[in-house]
Image (spheres, helix red, strand yellow):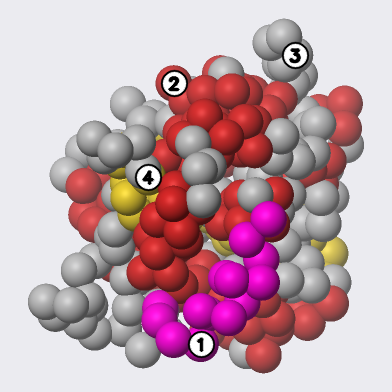
Amino acid sequence: MARIVVVFDFDKTIIDCDSDNWVIDELGATDMFNELLPTMPWNSLMDRMMKELHDQGKTIEDVEEVLKRTSIHPRVVPAIKAAHALGCDLRIVSDANLFFIETILKHLGLRDYFSEINTNPSFVDEEGRLRIFPYHDFHKSSHGCSLCPPNMCKGVIIKRIQASVTEEEEEKKFIYLGDGSGDYCPSLKLRDGDYVMPRKNFPLWDLICKNPLLIKAEIHEWIDGEDLERILLGLISKISLGENSHFFSADCKLQTISVSAQALPKALPVQQ
């Protein structure tokens, strides 16, 4: 079994934008979205917007074509493929939705690299409209976390994943990559010996900066896909080989990896 579990956020981590905003903007519904935003939770609003777009004649194929144009840094796909080739268990924890994520991953040839996708459920109904539902049904009960939006506590998901992998004999190390405020709660659930990779100058990084001592995991900031690849593969190499890598302090007492590029495993090419 894999010794390293790598957990990715999706929006602004794997892809370089927010998939919800991307679809709404590209299909010309930004004004309506902004008008409705103060009236309901984000997740509920996305379901409503899919109805409005469907009523305007937008098809599920239109949504798919927009998703296939989503921007992604050219080094992210090779980084994911390399991490998988090195034996890591790759998972996604995202507040997007299953249809958006799977459409993009399939387009990139990445769907089979992830053992699990934890996100808001969605499906195309008999009328061809995309329905989006909350991961946690907050209409019935609360998940009880004040740090997270009502539809999803990523900390609860991380604790479940931790519990499931500790049932296996081999000790697991976690690497968590994220950018948003919703990634702060799961970062707090990471343990000594784990690693968190917050995207620099994004909300998760800002929250960690306020008090990095609250985070038990080792902190490694990243800026873009090139950074993501270099640091992620460096951490995998460090864990796998059990070698002591050299680190130096950076902004807000965050630790940034410094590993020779020659020492990193070679990234796999993107399949065309």
Nearer to us in this view, 259 or 140: 140
Quarter occupied by residue 238: top right
Q: Position of residue 196 (x, y in %)?
A: 58, 60
Q: Earlier in the sequence, mark 3 or mark 1?
A: 1
For disc 3, the marked residue is 269
Q: Quadrant of residue 252?
A: bottom right
Residue 17 x, y percent position in the rendering: 70, 53
Q: Earlier in the sequence, mark 4 or mark 3?
A: 4
Mark 1, secondary structure of its residue: helix
**Disc 3 residue type (three-letter):** Pro
Q: What is the x, y in percent for residue 186?
A: 43, 68
Determine if the magenta segment contains residue 33. Answer: yes
The residue under the point 75% across, 14% down is 269
* Kind of residue sitting beneath label 4: Leu
* Span highlighted in magenta in the image: 28-41
Q: Residue at x 66, y 66 (%)?
A: 30
Q: Is residue 87 magenta?
A: no
* Residue pointed to by mark 1: 38
Which residue is denoted by mark 2 in the rendering?
112
Main SS of residues in magenta: helix
Foreground mark, 4 or 3, reads 4
Relative to 265, say whether 167 is above or below.
below
Give how far apart the Cα atoms at labels 4 and 2 are: 23 Å
Q: Using the image, tell me which numbered label, if any, was put on residue 130.
A: 4
